[in-house]
Image (tube, grey):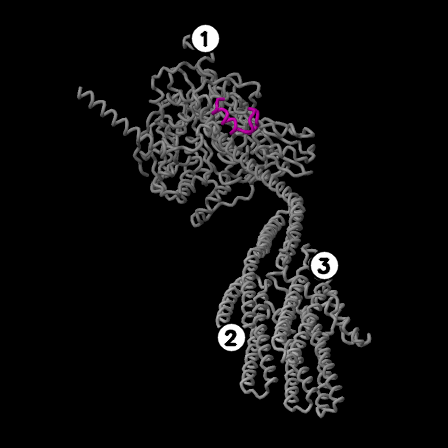
Amino acid sequence: MLTVLVAVGILLVLSLIFGAILGYANVRFHVEGDPIVDQIDAILPQTQCGQCGHPGCRPYAEAISNGEAINHCPPGGQATIQALADLLDVEAIPLDGDHGAETAKRVAVIREDECIGCTKCIQACPVDAILGAAKQMHTVISDECTGCDLCVEPCPVDCIDMVEVGVTSRTWSWDKPQGIAAQPGSIIATDRQAEVMH
Amino acid sequence: MQTASVFSFHGGIHPPENKAQSLRLPLGRPSLPTELVLPLGQHIGQSSRPLVNVGDKVLKGQTIAINNGFLSSFLHAPTSGTIKAIEARPIAHPSGLSDSCIIITPDGEEQWTELSPLQDWNSLSKTDVLAYLAEMGIVGMGGAGFPTQVKLQGAHKHPLTHFIINAAECEPYITADDMLIREKTIELVLGIEALQHLVEAEQVIIGIEDNKPTAIAALNKVLSERMSNIQVAVVPTKYPSGGEKQLIQLLTGQEVPSGQYPADIGVLCQNVGTCVAVHDAIFLGKPLISRFTTLTGDALKAPQNVEVLLGTPINHLLDYAENDNKKLKRLVMGGPMMGFTLDSANVPIVKTSNCVLAASKKELPQPAPEQACIRCGMCEQACPASLLPQQLLWFSKSQELEKAEHYNLFDCIECGACSYVCPSSIPLVQYYRHTKSSIREAREAAVKSDLAKQRFEARKARQEAEAAEKEAKRIARQKASASKTGETKKAAPKAAPAATPSANDDAKKLKVDLAIAKTKLKKLQKQLLEAQENEHTEEINTLQLQTNEQEKALALLEEQLAKANAAAPAEAPKAPANEELKKAKVDVALSGTKLKKAQKQLADAPDDAELQKKVAGFEKELADAQTRLNTLSSAAPSAAAPKAAVSDELKKAKVDVALSGTKLKKAQKQLADAPDDAELQKKVAGFEKELADAQTRLNTLSSAAPSAAAPKAAVSDELKKAKVDVALLGVKLKKAQKQLAEAPEDSDLQSKVASFEKELGEAQARLTQMTPQSAAPQAAANGNSEDALKKLKIDTAIAKAAVKKVEKALKKAEDLNSPELETIRQQLEEAKKRAEELEKALANPSAGATTAATNEVAQPQPTSGDKQRKIDLAIAKAAVKKAEKGILALQQQGQDQAQIDASGLPAKLAAAQAKLADLEGMTNSVNVEPVVNKPAATESASQAEQIKQQKIAAALAKAQINKLTKRLADSPQDADNIQQEINAAKQKQQEAETQLTELQLAQRTPSQDNTQENR
């Protein structure tokens, strides 16, 4: 009986000690803000296009942390959805078509001859990537353009094109090998041998 | 020549070498192609910048593009010719993409540009030599194309222990370096020596695989000939010993740490081709325009090494090597292990192209279909970088980039050994390449999204700031309009307190300041709004500052005004003090009445000691009450004058005087009845002394009475006293004259009359003296001037009466033929003179009063502006009245208009009236309270005081008459004397009554002039 009491007592004391330590740590190492929002925000492509229905990427990150679906970001595409799924430990679902389709990376290009200098696209650009002044020709700083399309709609003369960013020899990357299932029927080495012999 | 020790590295494979094919033929020199295509990006780093335009004629070796930044290189024309175009052409790249190239159409003349070899490279500074090498367009020719001068500069970071020349050439098929060493041994050694001079390494080792015995022999021969200390390290043939890190490990036993460069462990590695290029640049002045390239493969009938101009299209070389297009299945740039398949043969040779492999189908079969990893671990055994290829494969397949990075994916040299050994034919290197690309892309995307986020947040912050500014502007505008309407609202309630008594000068000044400040503020706000609308930022700032200051000043002024307004109502507590004062006055009056009663009783029974004690007690009581009253009145504003107290005391003194006078008269009468009675005479002298004492007391009291507080009452009382004296003396004189008339020979009587006359003159002199004395305090005090004027008039009247009396006396004397006729005449002259003097004085004090009034107006008291204004008003009114009266008096005295004008009274009247009008206007605008009544009230009060005095005098006279009548009844033997006394008393009473009526009349109609006659 005494042994049981001693054991219970020791366990109680231990629980109190660890409880105190945990309580102290909770206060001492308290993290301000919501770290998960920052992590989600880091994954999102920061095009600030608003296609997800939120005014920018961070608001969508906040919405995701509050339970919104992770497949509302067309610029991020499936890669972003996968990354979000991994982060949040949820199932990677296909991109929601209602918010737009995943497209190749594009940048806005102003047909400068047609630009009337209305500054409407400048006001629309979420990242200040359009340069120009009233009644002066505008141009897009292509390195800063996120390809969000937001400048296309306001243009009164429709002189903005969304141009796909071409792959140059410097930005080119190797393709992923097709993998095991690429050539069904030729998995077994003898099959190939037979083919060769034919 | 020494032989260096050789270490080993992990892994590695031994694929079939296939090097012999390309070494069968000697070094070939292909003909000039029809065009040379020179990509601007033949090296790692930024593409070069073209220096030439399309159509330019260029000479062989001429610079056609220069470096574009630090990590970049120069480009030279490999032959003389014309610039055909600068355009995008397919380049030798695994992607098969195009890049911008300079296309030269050779003219076939091979005309060199002027070559300027660096003869004094030994003496030149290393920096200059490095710059020269950069200008010669020399890049690493082993494979990556790293600009050589950058690599050499980096080598200076740490003390260099090993300078390794990479001649291993481990890749199958490729023999370009072997051929280079064989062909250009001396150039190679000279180039190594030149580089060693630049890098000053402890050891220079040429690492060469043992499958190149001819090259080794050639090297050894040259090195021993030159007695060079360059070591030749023959390493066993093992793929990939030619890899930089692997060769370093082979020759030094040191491993280059992950993520670091060879320079970090004091090792520099250069390709043999680079060394030869350095030799050509320094000793011959030739830029890098050509290179050794192996053309090999089963598809070529004449595989060989060629020294080829850069930019030569591969199909031209294939033609030169007698390509069999039927056999050609796969064209590979580089070796079979690390090279990449070319989609087109129409790509040029660049600085890093060491081999073109035109493989047949048999030679390079289609890679076997990928099968599942069986986790055999052979890849790990083969990996020269000691990585875990299998793990990397999993991570690559599942796109776990971070984990792949964590497993040092970037240390993979993509040698392909793992793929080569893989029993499942898994293209591991392809996976790794893809994963590496993905990681790079992710990094770039992260950088870009960070930038976008930054820019987005900056924009958001800017927009918020703009919105806040707009909001602030809107609020400012709203405030401005609100304050405009608010000011008009404020103005209404403010006007009301302004009209109330608090409108003193200070407050007025403050209000004016306030109004000015407000106007300024409004102006500033208007300017500010304008500036904001026009977006003049600097102006806005200054204006904002000014506006703030103005607002502060305004707030201060308003505070001050509020204080001033609060100070004004503080005058209100007068009322309770007044009540207390009234009580004290009532006490005093009560005490006075008691005292009077007692004194009367005392007068009836002068010897009653008890009564005298009672009188003394009452006097004490009265004094107490007066002290109390005085304290109160001094505490209360000066306006509440202690005139009642003073007048009471004065009255008492006068009563004393009258008493003494009566006693004296009695004694004199007794003396007259019994002129020889010495005792009576003594008594008379005592009474006279008493009278004199009483009069002195009265004088002191009058002078002691606070002239400023109630000078009116005091002065008027003193004057009255003096007048009473004069009247008394006049009566005495008359009596004496009567007696004299009855007994003209009585010298005693004559002397008495003379002394009386003298006394009368003295009293009159005193009276006149007092009048100008009283002028000053009169001027200062409220409504005094009028009284003074009245007094003067009375004096004048008295003087006139005196003149008349003297004239009568003169008539009598003439009738009697008296010897005193001359004296009386003299007296008459004097009296006339006095009357004239008084008349003059009457004109003067009004002038004095007027100036006093103006003075008073000129120096307004700031503390009690309201009261001051009232006082000023009263003074002005008095001045007006005085002037009017003066004029009236002059008119009554029968002086003509010219004289009146000359006296300046009308002018004064006009001035006084103007002043009055001004003041009234001021007062009415500020104060609706009836100011007019107050001075009138005080005036009437003073008149009432006088009336009282006259009544007292009349009562006294009546009392005397009654007494005398009683005595007449009691002692009929004295009937004559008593009758005389009764007459005198009646005369006195009449005099008093006349004055009384006169005063009452004046009280009722203050503007009306007094009747001047006393009798």
User: Is B1011 above or below relative to B533?
Assistant: below
Residue B110: x %, y % from top left: 57, 37
Secondary element under disc 3, as helix, strand or loop, is helix
Q: Nearer the viewer, mark 3 or mark 1?
A: 3
Q: Quadrant of the C terminus of chain B?
A: bottom right
Residue B28's tag is: none
Q: Residue at x 42, y 22 (%)?
A: B396
Q: Quadrant of the N terminus of chain B?
A: top left
Q: Nearer the viewer, residue B942 or A28?
A: B942
Residue B921's tag is: 3
Residue wearing tag 1: A185
Residue B607's tag is: 2
User: Is B683 above or below relative to A179?
Assistant: below
Q: Nearer the viewer, residue B585 or A5?
A: B585
Q: Nearer the viewer, residue B556 or B522?
A: B556
The verdict on a common chain for dots 3 and 1 is no
Chain to which mark 3 belongs: B
Q: Which residues are magenta?
A: A47-67
Residue at the far left: name it: A2
Q: Quadrant of residue A99?
A: top right
